[in-house]
Amino acid sequence: MTYFINPLPHSSSSSEGRVGVLLINLGTPEATDYFSVRRYLKEFLSDRRVVEMPPLLWQPILQSFVLTRRPFKTGKNYKRIWNRAENASPLRVYTERQAYELAARFEKESIPVGWAMRYGKPSIEEAVSQLMRQGCDRIISLPLYPQYSASTTATAQDQLFRYLMRLRRQPSIVTVPSFPDHPIFIKALAESVKKHLGTLDFKPQRLIISFHGVPEFFIKKGDPYQDECFRTAEALREELGLTEEQAPVTFQSRFGPTEWIKPYTAPFVQSLPQKGITKIAVITPGFMTDCIETLDEIGRELREEFLEVGGQDFAYIPCLNESEGTIDLLEALSRHALKAF
Ligand SMILES: C=CC1=C(C)c2cc3[nH]c(cc4nc(cc5[nH]c(cc1n2)c(C)c5CCC(=O)O)C(CCC(=O)O)=C4C)c(C)c3C=C
Ligand SMILES: [Fe+2]
Ligand SMILES: [Fe+2]
């Protein structure tokens, strides 16, 4: 019996010396029922990188309050956005498509592309062992977060290295840094804005740039996330020729009673009609794929909230998903990382 694992076929200890790319996204439930959503939220919200409270204090709250109620509400929201054709959540569908399209770019070089979720399935362990079985002894880890946060990027890398801790023979790893103002990212965002605005029958007075929030104390303790959001927003404004007033930054998805980084998206947007701003577009450049936070919280909930208080026109600009610009970006990031081996 041994503690250390060998994911390679029996007796094979040599590898073919290939490089592989691993895309890592956040994670998502397997289905919309209470137990599937509960399982996902339990794993996600038990991560100390996400909720920075001593487990002895947090676990009783999580088990007795959060996990008894929230899966119902969240499951209902997932139901609205579920991809019925593929019976999967949009985040999973788009992540898989990104991996598929990126693999096509690397086909000739015989570089396999895997994809994994930090929480849920396919797990990082499954994806890494699959790459190793394909002969990879070098892996590029690419967390799908444009802006670094300990609660997303770092925990994805933690999970990868947690698996590596169990391997007798580890692959070499290059981790791709965040890319908040990478020119290809900004160009893809700007093109998506122009394309989308071109389809509207109204001219938005504001382009709201909404990012997922984090607790304020994360930033005070040194998480560069907010600065990186500002870098994305500033580069996008520059590319589109917009001012800060025309394209303001807001933060969505507050969770729990603590203060999160501000301004909060919903109250900010609800305050606009009284200032004569009744036509807006919203973009969410913190998300590489559409998901519950973009399609439901912004595309449905925020739209309703804006129209209820006198807003007239609301447009949600989809995430980059598997667009050509995204794949250009992922290819450029991977090719740059390849040079580090
Ligand atoms: C509890 C605190 C949370 C922190 C901190 C947090 C940071 C964070 N999250 C994302 C990206 C996503 N979050 C998503 C869903 C989601 N996030 C939280 C909580 C925190 N996130 C919850 C409870 C949920 C589940 C939905 C809900 O119950 O409201 C998703 C969507 C996943 C999907 O399947 O669609 C993404 C993506 C970032 C980028 C971030 C910090 C920068
Ligand atoms: Fe989140
Ligand atoms: Fe949310």
Image: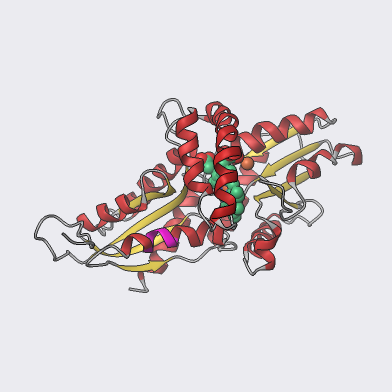
State the count of labels. 0
Is 154 situated above or below 69?
A: below
Image coords of residue 250 (percent x, y): 73, 50
Query: Does residue 234 show up?
Result: no
Query: Does residue 262 show up?
Result: yes
Q: Is the magenta stretch mostly helix, strand or loop?
A: helix
| Residue 240 in which image quadrant | bottom right
Whether 277 is among the magenta residues is no
Residue at screen point 13% across, 55% down: 9
The colouring scheme, among rainbow, by chain, secondary structure or one colour, is secondary structure
Image coords of residue 246 (percent x, y): 79, 51
Residue range of the region highlighted in magenta in the rendering: 157-161
Residue closest to the far left: 11
Q: In the image, is 155 to the left or to the right of 256? A: left
Quarter containing the N terminus: bottom left
Q: In the image, is 276 to the left or to the right of 39? A: right
Residue closest to the far bottom: 340
Is 11 situated above or below 256?
A: below
Q: In the image, is 109 to the left or to the right of 58? A: left
Ligand 3 shows up in which quadrant of the image?
A: top right
Image coords of residue 322 (percent x, y): 46, 44
| Residue 197 in which image quadrant | top right
Residue at screen point 50% across, 62% down: 154
Image coords of residue 204 (percent x, y): 77, 40
Residue at screen point 32% across, 73% down: 341
Q: In the image, is 85 to the left or to the right of 2? A: right
Residue closest to the far right: 275
Residue at screen point 64% across, 69% down: 222
